[in-house]
Amino acid sequence: MSYVTVKNINKQFQQKSVLKNVSFTIEKGERFGLIGPNGAGKSTLIDIMTGLTAAESGEVMVDGVDIKKDILAIRKKLGVVPQDIALMEELTGYDNLIYFGGMYGLSGAILKTRVNELLTTIGLTAHAKKKVKTYSGGMKRRLNIAAALLHHPEFLILDEPTVGVDPQSRQYIFDFLKQLNEAGTTILYISHYMEEIEALCERLLILDLGTEVAYGTKAEVKSLVRQSSKVTITLDYVSDEVLTAIEALDNGISEVTRDFNNITLLVDSSVFSMMRLIQALEATDSVIKSLSLEDISLEETFLQLTGKSLRE
């Protein structure tokens, strides 16, 4: 049995369907990714999984427990890191963790020991007695994560945990989450940073307009996109003759993008011929400086599956 099972979840707001038969599983000890554009239904799904709202139909099971039958048992296993930082600015980092630990039923020496452990782990011991309002964005994010870990949760849900932080803080958080996972914590990671999902998670779910667009391993999700490879060409200059030659190829090319002297092609790798492309380019008046073929990234797959237009 999977550690987390979400089965046929449906949810409506004001007679509008916001989740439609969403199903997926998360295995114990897995790092699982959830991706979707604005309005995809991610927040509603997390609210259902954490018992903050109820679905019209479907079920959520965590470690064999039905959320509708024993939400308290599930919450003891669950840690949630919200996108909005849930800290009290006028309290110190130490006092924030003492406060949240009390909410989890911890007290006395056990609580103080756990707070000090986490402050050390997230690298904030030297700042423990400073008010949170003096913290940088990265420090607040790390403390926000620590607050969700006080009760040693088995299952950690993180909603955009690196929003607004610098690259160093992002990497620190990433490394910390990997260590948590290696120690046995199951992680559900929600992000708009596709490179984070690609680096952290092996399996993922893409939601769009409340519907499952893709679900599976990264390789399985990428295979859903016919344009599964990307060719990057650098020339001494790009003439109209070059663009015409590329467009004339019946070579599995679906998209051509030009950026000064660089051309990017999205291609169907099952029919694309690099040799035919090279021959076509060599027949023009431009000189090839470099040429590369690589699998498309998870972000490019996401845009192909959900569309490239902005979502409000």
Image (tube, grey):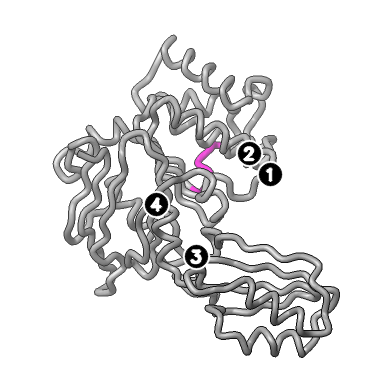
Q: Give the residue at mark 3.
A: 301
Q: Main secondary structure of the magenta part?
A: loop
Residue marked by disc 4 = 217
The local secondary structure at tag 4 comes to strand
Q: Secondary structure at mark 3?
A: helix
Amino acid under label 1? Pro
Count the marks. Answer: 4
Where in the figure is residue 217, as x and y percent of width and height? 39, 52
Say which residue appears at 45% left-offset and 61% top-offset: 222
Nearer the observer: mark 4 or 1; the answer is: 4
Q: Depth check: 47 or 305 in front?
A: 305
Identify whether 41 is placed above or below 191: below
At label 1, counting other C-alpha atoms closer than 10 Å, the crowd grade (few under 14, some 14-19, many 20 or more) is few
- The label nearer to you, 1 versus 3, is 3
Residue at (45, 50) in percent of width and height? 190
Q: How much space separates mark 3 and mark 4, taking CA atoms?
A: 13 Å
Q: Position of residue 53 (x, y in %)?
A: 27, 53
Residue under label 2, please give it.
Answer: 171
Measured in 3D between alpha carbons, the distance from the residue under mark 4 to the one under mark 1, in whole angstroms, is 26 Å
Q: In this image, 19 relative to 175: left or right?
A: left
183 relative to 129 in the view: left or right: left
x and y, in percent, of residue 2 in the image: 24, 40
Which badge, 4 or 2, comes first in the chain's sequence? Answer: 2
Q: CA distance from mark 1 to mark 3?
A: 24 Å
Say whether disc 3 or disc 4 marks the residue closer to the N-terminus: 4
Foreground pick, 13 / 263: 263
Q: Are marks 3 and 2 in contact (CB under 8 Å)?
A: no
Distance (Cα) linking label 4 and label 2: 23 Å
User: Which disc number belongs to residue 167?
Assistant: 1
